[in-house]
């Protein structure tokens, strides 16, 4: 087996997460973490730990939310939550709401999600998923003293592809992008456009050991230590395409 | 270690690939493949094996290619190749050409790439990457008799995120999408919008053990056997969003 091997290990046996839970500590006591591990945690449990779950029945939909909901065939209160979480609605058609969230992420329903939360409630994205990642990292490193990285991940749809892929909405201690632009390729030629979104690929890899129904909300990606940094780094915010470079809104 | 663990192993020691090479056989003799392995092969070597590499100097740019090249600061002959590979140019601005390829993929430069090929040449996408995946799969299974799957992968940019992620442009023997819509979540609620692009996530996981300069053009994803099928299946074509459902062109 090559030393360059990567392993992805599910974090099993986590309890149902509640507001105030310290996810990093709960993970650290269940996993034998190694230096350079990347701990990928699902947004859903981060939001639960941070109290970012709301009762849909307590939301009063505005007129705009009611109109949009009627147009799209959605629950007006859920649409109100989406609007509250959005800086901008980018598309609202064919039953789909694509928004830029207050965090600057472009995704469906501004990250508002009614699955895997108690019936009648909805989860919202963490207020700042990079801060969430830093806090979980501090808990993990406080618990075991090893330099690990953290990714907070969520499933995003894609403009031109069906299905969703897990991406990094937050990260800490991981180089989010491996930028090869200007470096040499295998033949000594120049790589012109290769900047790999490592944090997103780590989120995707972690998703492969999870089962959407099994309640495995975290996984360890082992073998990426060359991308793990001492400081928290720029976070997943650095993977958001600036509006000025966006050709698609 | 959990039985649900995933491993990603680089395929090392492959020779420089030339037209006519049988990639499946070259991989099979280097790796001890197991039943249910997913073999992810970079588009670049598939294109080389299939002779989809052209000399840029032999391309005669049309007037339209010359105009576009001047506007975008690109090589007119490369732009001609991009146009030849495209069904439609979706965006041509700020130095970027986003196209729908003849294969129905939406990506930068219609997949035409001048890195990791001999200087002065460019690689084009395989004519039908799902067919490529089926051929490589047949070679692998002919060599070792084990049921494995194949993904042909390429790096794609994303509309709203920086950096590229590896996606499946072709696949065979792998369920490309794990569709949870209508199934129950962990709390017994209904999952409304979860369909996971397994083939894309497998491509992304494989990319994490590759080094863009090292010439490791393939990797094995082990632990996804539940997604590996007896027949070749619908291929990665089933992950292309149909034009009628596309909100972004």
Image (tube, coloured by chain):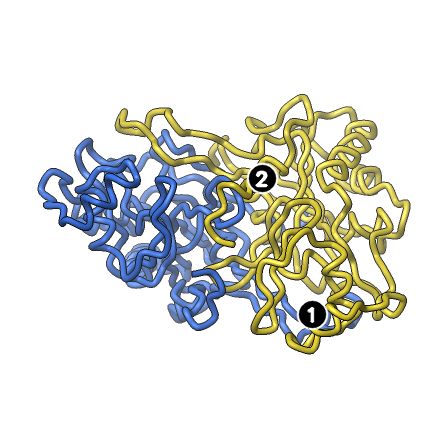
Chain colours: A yellow, B blue
Q: Residue at x 67, y 21 (%)?
A: A230
Seen in the picture, residue B115 relative to A188 is either above or below; the reply is below
Q: Depth check: give the residue in front, A10 or A129.
A: A129
Horizontal side of residue A105 vs A191, given as left or right: right
Q: Which residue is mark 1?
A: B191
Q: Residue at x 77, y 28 (%)?
A: A141
Numbered circle sitting on residue A199: 2
Q: Report in which chain the residue with disc 1 lies.
A: B
Horizontal side of residue B97 vs A68, given as left or right: left
Residue A74 figure quarter: bottom right
Q: Depth check: give the residue in front, A245 or B15.
A: A245
Q: Position of residue B44 (x, y in %)?
A: 30, 44
Figure quadrant of the C terminus of chain B: bottom left
Q: Residue at x 62, y 60 (%)?
A: A108
Horizontal side of residue B167 vs B224, given as left or right: left
Q: Secondary structure at mark 2?
A: helix
Residues at marks 1 and 2 touching, judged by CB atoms closer than 8 Å: no
Can residue B1 be spotted in the picture?
no
Residues packed near mark 1 inside 10 Å, few (<14), some (14 to 19) or many (20 plus)? many
Seen in the picture, residue B200 relative to A148 is either above or below; the reply is below
Q: Depth check: give the residue in front, A65 or B230.
A: A65
Residues packed near mark 2 inside 10 Å, few (<14), some (14 to 19) or many (20 plus)? many
Residue B141 figure quarter: bottom left
Numbered circle sitting on residue A41: none
Q: Residue at x 47, y 63 (%)?
A: B176
Q: Position of residue A153 (x, y in %)?
A: 66, 47
Q: Report in which chain the residue with disc 2 lies.
A: A
Q: Position of residue A90 (x, y in %)?
A: 58, 58
């Amino acid at each position: 087996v090559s030393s360059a091997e990567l392993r992805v290990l599910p974090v099993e046996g986590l309890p149902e997460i509640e507001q105030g839970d310290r996810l990093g500590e709960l993970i650290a006591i269940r996993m034998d973490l190694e230096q350079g591990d990347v701990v990928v945690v699902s947004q859903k449990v981060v939001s639960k730990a941070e109290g970012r779950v709301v009762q849909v029945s307590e939301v009063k939909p505005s007129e705009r939310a009611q109109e949009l909901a009627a147009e799209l065939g959605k629950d007006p209160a859920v649409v109100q939550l989406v609007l509250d979480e959005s800086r901008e609605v980018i598309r609202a058609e064919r039953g789909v709401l694509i928004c830029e969230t207050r965090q600057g992420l472009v995704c469906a329903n501004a990250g508002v999600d009614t699955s895997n939360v108690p019936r009648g409630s909805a989860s919202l994205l963490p207020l700042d998923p990079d801060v969430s990642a830093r806090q979980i990292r501090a808990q993990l490193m406080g618990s075991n003293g090893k330099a690990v990285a953290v990714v907070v991940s969520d499933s995003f749809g894609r403009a031109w592809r069906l299905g969703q892929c897990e991406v990094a909405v937050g990260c800490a201690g991981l180089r989010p992008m491996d930028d090869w632009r200007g470096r040499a390729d295998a033949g000594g030629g120049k790589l012109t456009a290769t900047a790999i979104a490592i944090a997103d690929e780590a989120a995707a890899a972690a998703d492969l050991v999870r089962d959407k129904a099994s309640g495995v909300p975290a996984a360890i990606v082992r073998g990426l230590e060359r991308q793990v940094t001492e400081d928290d780094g720029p976070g997943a915010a650095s993977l958001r395409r600036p509006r000025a470079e966006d050709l698609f809104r």
